[in-house]
Amino acid sequence: MPPRLELLGISKQYPAVKANDRIHLTVQPGEIHAVLGENGAGKSTLMKIIYGAVRPDEGEMRWNGQPVVVRNPHEARELGISMVFQHFSLFDTLTAAENVWLGLGKRLSLAQVSDRIREVSGQYGLDVEPQRPVHTLSVGERQRVEIVRALLTNPQLLILDEPTSVLTPQAVDKLFVTLRKLADTGCSILYISHKLDEIRTLCHHCTVLRGGRVTGEVDPTKESNASLSRLMIGSDPPELVHREARAGEVALAVRGLSLPKLHPFGTVLRDIAFELRTGEILGVAGVSGNGQQELLAALSGEDTRAPGDSIRLFGRDIARHGARQRRKEGLHFVPEERLGRGAVPTLSLALNTLLTRTEAVHRATGWIDMHRVREMTDEIIRRFQVKAGGAAAAAKSLSGGNLQKFIVGREISANPRVLIVAQPTWGVDVGAAAQIRSELLALRDAGCALLVVSEELEELFEISDRLVVIAQGRLSPSVPTREATVEQIGEWMSGLWPQTTGAVHAQA
């Protein structure tokens, strides 16, 4: 049989960078083929070329042995190519079913599509409610919609860009079972991930990119994490130093925080209570859609419906303070959604710095010192090794991982007293993830109090001093990370935790 897909000498030049430089890639039928590379290596551009979302400057693509020119995603889907993007391509104002229906043509009615979504999501353990509007979904839930939409097309080639970045370990295991079943039927899978363990466990072959070029092809099952890391970034990732926490005074205290749904598909918060102290990191685990969005909105000031005195910052009631006032008092926030929440896609990095950093705004006159803004932005780019065309580069021009580094860096460099972070290393390569985690630990060691909400248990175990779980709008007791196990936290994610005396608290 001919290869399912062949790329011969594919190149793509953008004004500031050559994203792909004479790339050759071959994928066989039924093969799970990893594409590995650090942020900005050209992986996403290459996948968009295969899917018809980007046109190459030169090179040839062959499909089942025949030369093809894929001019748009519709033609790709007609060939049998489906893709799940890292930055989701969903319409916020439509339901999950309507978004899926748009990509399937007119073969099925909307009611039939809804039935198929329930069937496929149940079959693969990807919980999706067809009638739920996309704007009410968390990042993890949106990812499930994208994966189900791709599976409904019965693809010959499925492209997955960071598919497990916001899935729980249990959901990852289910997804891997699904992908292996698909591969057994002859479906080829191109798998992009920064999680080296996943690539070694799942994939049959691995192509490594660095600086837009292929730097190696290996059998990942015969490689170690260290050897894959060296192929990807040219060196071993920096070692993370996690010193014993020196918890101090209570920085953020939450008591009796109960909130009704903001919309019919939201999650009710039920008597949330915890204390977060200076000099510690409290990790919050949980399956996407169990109240993380609602809790983050209440803590960041996006939702100011919290009962009076239910949220206190260094002893001061801030329950009804908005996000701007909370930032003035030292509480900063990194949202889980990069584009649209963390950054405005069309604005420059300099103007995106101004979204949360007002040091360059003259208090008396309101004038903005743009020279100072550019200096601040350049410092963030330098310190956090963001690959970008300078402070004037538009946010949407950055790869997902580099934009994440910029947004996290923008808040860390503000020297917050309390920092709330959602999905800090989503879609970030091994080296950058280690850097971000190291910066979070350094901030903790400097006396900041950090609340980290993540669906990557490995990350939470690596940087947290204590762990809690959110499930069905309730918060579990806290447990010191050194005493917790993955199995225990996984069980708590189902809402099965021991009920302690009194209210469920996360005490220091």
Image: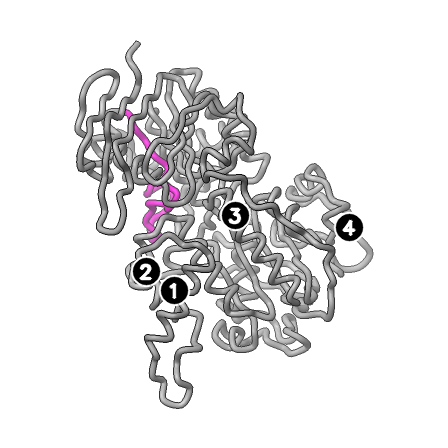
Q: Is residue 13 magenta?
A: no
Tell me the quadrant of the picture where the C terminus can be found. bottom right
Which secondary structure lies at badge 4?
A: loop
Q: Residues within 10 Å of mark 2 (few under 14, many from 20)?
A: some
Instruction: Using the rendered view, name the quadrant where residue 114 is placed.
Output: top left
Residues shaded magenta: 80-99
Of badges 1 and 3, nearer the viewer stands 1
Asked whether the beta carbons under mark 1 and mark 2 sit within 8 Å of each other, the answer is yes
Asked whether the beta carbons under mark 4 and mark 2 sit within 8 Å of each other, the answer is no
Give the amino acid type for the residue marked by disc 3 in the picture: Ala
Tell me the quadrant of the picture where the N terminus can be found. top left
Give the amino acid type for the residue marked by disc 4 in the picture: Gln
Residue 28: % across, % down: 35, 17
Q: CA distance from mark 1 to mark 3?
A: 20 Å
Report the disc number at residue 433: 3
Report the disc number at residue 378: 1
Q: CA distance from mark 4 to mark 3?
A: 35 Å
Q: CA distance from mark 1 to mark 2?
A: 7 Å
71 left or right of 184?
left
Q: How many marks?
A: 4
Report the disc number at residue 499: 4
Asked whether the beta carbons under mark 1 and mark 4 sit within 8 Å of each other, the answer is no
Question: What secondary structure is the stretch in magenta mostly built from?
Answer: loop
Which secondary structure lies at badge 3?
A: helix
Mark 2 sits on what residue?
Answer: 390
